[in-house]
Image (spheres, rainbow, N blue to C red):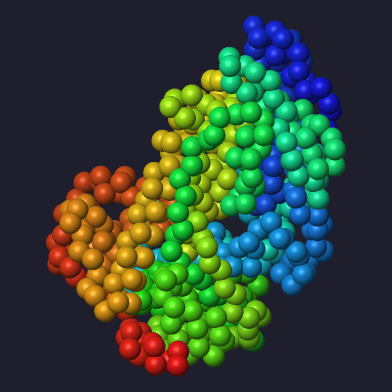
């Protein structure tokens, strides 16, 4: 990467020059960008910015090179910086929306690698008799694959992108800054290899393991704003592969199903594979026996609508994951950025309970909006910082808040059922209405589609509920306190299964 700030170094000294003037004069209007993190969202950010004309260096802490094949990526790719690398993984329709619009070659490479199409309309429950298609139904479908497969595809495309330099085994150990209007302005990074890379923009895409607060503190910046809490769940996942080329068909309208004091998540995946996850409240001691294969298998087998997902060859042990954080960060405090020249994207900005599969969907959409903003705001660091904060708060923070609300409600329900209590009553009328939505969606074709828009990260819950007639239809189709009752073991039966 060129040193000294690249093509834009001299613009800082002549702020009256704009990108438009430089373009008109024939100068190359490219920014130098450093992306921290070479996971899926970091690579997507790099590709989107590079294809807009910027020069992008990606620093990835893990040193392992990209394997030669998808099978090698699954079996032997060491990605210590990604704790969920072999945990359940699903690409929501919002991912396909970004790929279709901006990265169609990545979409095609995913399909070539064996990604599978998933369409919730094929899972429409028999309680819905109206099966007529609607305009726009295709937007609800996704193309999905395991996390190693997905990252293998993104890495392969990025390594062949002319304006992207991907450096593995290198991480940022410090930020270089200068003061701008009394605020630290990030001008680049110091790397673990001893270099100083200058940049017009540094993007933190290091995900859940982001060390940005320390880097900012060491650079003399004020603390960023952060909220964090344990989501309250433990996951137990096992992967399977088909022995005859067939895949289990879902028998539930949603891939995530609450069964009393545990939930079960079944995800189709690439190359005739799939995953089954049981997740529990982290405080439920007896259910932690699910880490044992026999107990895990017996529990899935006791769920009539899910037992057929065991009909395959196991390709993993039971993989536990706990300590999952819901965490939200913001660089603006009291209306003032703690630093400029810096942007947080995807899980480095906010991460949530993975069972809703919102991480990559929102992460790729976030990266695409960063690309959009960089087209018009990079000339003025403070303007860019304010605009990026405002955009993120308006378009993405509502998704974070909605996800946390779902997590809290489900954890409270699990704890009540564990303790033999009635599930907590919802005093808030809006929350009560939303709790009735899944059941109503199983009884009405249009509500089902609207519900799947939320599941697929296509439309915010508040926007769906604001539609004319949605709330009235939910109230018409359901009774107060009425709940879905998917078949599965009762709490006493579950404890007996677990020995």
Look at the picture and state if 487 lies above or below 94.
below
Q: Tell me which corner region of the image, top left, top right, bottom left or bottom right, holds residue 433.
A: bottom left
Q: Nearer the viewer, residue 72 or 497?
A: 497
Q: Taking 401 as reference, is 2 left or right?
A: right
Q: How many marks?
A: 0
Q: Tell me which corner region of the image, top left, top right, bottom left or bottom right, holds residue 33.
A: top right
Residue at screen point 81% across, 22% down: 4
Residue at screen point 67% across, 30% down: 219
Q: Nearer the viewer, residue 17 or 453?
A: 17
Query: Residue 216 location, x and y as percent?
Result: 63, 34
Q: Taking 395 as reference, is 203 left or right?
A: right
Query: Residue 127 location, x and y as percent?
Result: 27, 74
Q: Taking 248 as reference, is 198 left or right?
A: right
The answer to whether residue 135 is visible is no
Q: Nearer the viewer, residue 387 or 156?
A: 387
Work out which quarter of the rendered image holds the N terminus and state it.
Answer: top right
Q: Tell me which corner region of the image, top left, top right, bottom left or bottom right, holds residue 52.
A: top right
Residue at screen point 54% across, 43% down: 349
Work out which quarter of the rendered image holds the C terminus and state it.
Answer: bottom left
Query: Residue 356 location, x and y as percent?
Result: 45, 61
Residue at screen point 54% across, 34% down: 223
Q: Taking 324 as reference, is 133 left or right?
A: left
Query: Residue 330 location, x and y as percent?
Result: 50, 37
The answer to whether residue 400 is visible is yes
Look at the picture and state if 115 lies above or below 42.
below
């Amino acid at each position: 990467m060129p040193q000294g700030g690249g093509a834009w170094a001299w613009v800082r000294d002549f702020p009256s020059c704009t990108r438009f003037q430089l373009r008109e004069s024939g100068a190359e209007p490219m920014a130098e960008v450093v992306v921290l993190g070479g996971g899926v969202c970091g690579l997507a950010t790099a590709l989107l910015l590079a294809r807009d004309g910027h020069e992008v260096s990606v620093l990835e802490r893990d040193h392992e090179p990209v394997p030669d094949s998808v099978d090698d990526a699954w079996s032997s790719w060491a990605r210590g910086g990604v704790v969920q690398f072999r945990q359940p993984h699903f690409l929501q329709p919002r991912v396909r929306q970004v790929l279709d619009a901006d990265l169609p070659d990545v979409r095609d490479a995913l399909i070539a690698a064996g990604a599978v199409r998933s369409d919730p309309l094929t899972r429409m429950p028999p309680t819905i008799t109206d099966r007529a298609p609607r305009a726009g139904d295709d937007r609800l479908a996704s193309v999905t694959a395991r996390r190693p497969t997905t990252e293998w595809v993104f890495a392969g495309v990025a390594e062949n992108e002319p304006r992207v330099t991907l450096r593995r085994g290198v991480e940022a150990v410090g930020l270089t800054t200068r003061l701008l209007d009394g605020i630290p302005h990030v001008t680049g990074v110091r790397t673990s290899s001893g270099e100083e890379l200058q940049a017009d923009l540094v993007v933190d895409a290091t995900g859940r393991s982001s060390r940005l607060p320390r880097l900012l503190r060491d650079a003399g910046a004020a603390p960023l704003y952060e909220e964090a809490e344990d989501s309250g769940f433990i996951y137990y996942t096992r992967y399977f592969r088909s022995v005859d080329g067939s895949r289990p068909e879902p028998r539930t309208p949603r891939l995530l199903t609450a069964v009393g004091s545990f939930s079960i998540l079944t995800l189709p995946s690439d190359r005739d594979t799939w995953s089954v996850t049981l997740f529990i409240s982290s405080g439920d001691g007896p259910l932690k026996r699910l880490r044992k294969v026999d107990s895990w298998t017996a529990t899935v087998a006791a769920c009539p609508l899910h037992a057929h997902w065991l009909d395959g060859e196991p390709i993993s042990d039971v993989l536990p994951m706990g300590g999952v954080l819901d965490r939200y960060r913001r660089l603006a405090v009291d209306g003032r950025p703690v630093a400029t020249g810096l942007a947080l994207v995807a899980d480095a900005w906010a991460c949530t309970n993975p069972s809703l599969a919102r991480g990559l969907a929102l992460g790729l959409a976030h990266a695409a909006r960063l690309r959009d903003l960089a087209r018009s705001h990079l000339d003025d660091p403070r303007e860019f910082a304010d605009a990026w904060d405002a955009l993120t708060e308006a378009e993405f923070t509502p998704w974070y808040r909605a996800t946390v609300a779902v997590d809290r409600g489900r954890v409270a329900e699990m704890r009540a059922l564990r303790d033999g209590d009635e599930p907590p009553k919802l005093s808030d009328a809006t929350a009560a209405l939303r709790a009735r939505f899944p059941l109503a969606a199983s009884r009405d074709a249009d509500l089902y589609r609207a519900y799947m828009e939320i599941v697929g990260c296509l439309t915010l819950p508040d926007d769906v509920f604001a539609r004319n007639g949605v709330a009235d239809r939910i109230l018409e189709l359901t009774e107060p306190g009425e709940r879905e009752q998917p078949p599965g073991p009762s709490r006493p039966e579950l404890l007996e299964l677990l020995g």
